[in-house]
Amino acid sequence: MVVSVIEPFCDIKYFISDNNIEMFSKASFVFKNWGDYVEHDKYKAYLKQQYSQEIRPLQSVNDVISAFQKKLDIVETELSESEDIFLEMTIPNYINAHKNDPIKSNLNNLNFISYEVVRNEKSDHYYNHMGITSDNERILVIAESQLNAITSNCEELKVDMIIERGIDIFHVNQETPDFFAYLMLFDSRNENH
């Protein structure tokens, strides 16, 4: 199984979670319509003007899963041996992203739950985006409620779920790097839809 990472306008690879999204926002931004590097201030102004009305308040990953279960058939599942590699790669990223967070001090008792996106007409868009044609492959979602973290082996679904999860109002009011990284996800989604 190939594990992909989000790189919409960025020269680094990462998994999105509460803390490491900042790495993404500090990287060099590329505005694809211009095809060139642009100044941060211009791109920030563009993002605010274009997507501020689409910002969602922060929700739990359980709420995100519930919201997507209304759109897609998503069921809790056990991972196969080959799929377990995806989870094993995800866990250290989440732990590293939160190891210095005093609020999340109990990182030894994380409960990662895996879900399968059932392949049918509701999910065909995501399966087609990934180019999955084999019945042996499937789209997975991994969620951990203590960290409020969610990821998927499908880039497009991961972006959609993180957008749905929303962002804390503090980041919006303070216009933190996390805020602009969140707005960049809308740009990424628009490129892929």
Image (cartoon, rainbow, N blue to C red):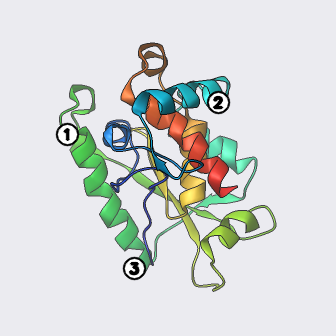
Residue 174's place in the image compared with 18, above or below, is above
From the image, tell me which residue sits under label 2.
50
Question: Farthest residue in the left direction?
Answer: 100
Question: Which corner quadrant holds the C terminus?
Answer: bottom right
Amino acid type, mark 1: Lys
The number of callouts visible is 3
Question: Farthest residue in the right direction?
Answer: 121
Direction from residue 30 to residue 94 in the image, left or right:
left
Question: Which corner quadrant holds the N terminus?
Answer: bottom left
Closer to viewer: mark 3 or mark 2? 2
Residue 187 x/y as whole percent: 59, 43
Do the residues bearing badges 3 and 2 touch, measured as CB atoms within 8 Å? no
Residue shown at the point (19%, 40%) measured from the top left:
99
Helix, strand or loop under label 2: helix
Helix, strand or loop under label 3: helix
The answer to whether residue 55 of the structure is visible from this angle is no
Quadrant of the image occupied by residue 103: top left
Residue shown at the point (77%, 69%) measured from the top left:
120
From the image, tell me which residue sits under label 3.
81
- Compare residues 125 and 82 and report the one nearer the observer: 125
- Compare residues 169 and 76 and report the one nearer the observer: 169
Question: Farthest residue in the top direction?
Answer: 173
Marks 3 and 2, how far apart in space?
A: 43 Å
Other residues around mark 3 within 10 Å, as few (<14) / some (14–19) / many (≥20): few
Direction from residue 106 to residue 30 in the image, left or right:
right
Precedes in sequence: disc 3 or disc 2: 2
Helix, strand or loop under label 1: loop
Residue shown at the point (46%, 31%) measured from the top left:
180
Closer to viewer: mark 3 or mark 1? 1
Marks 3 and 1, how far apart in space?
A: 27 Å
From the image, tell me which residue sits under label 1.
99
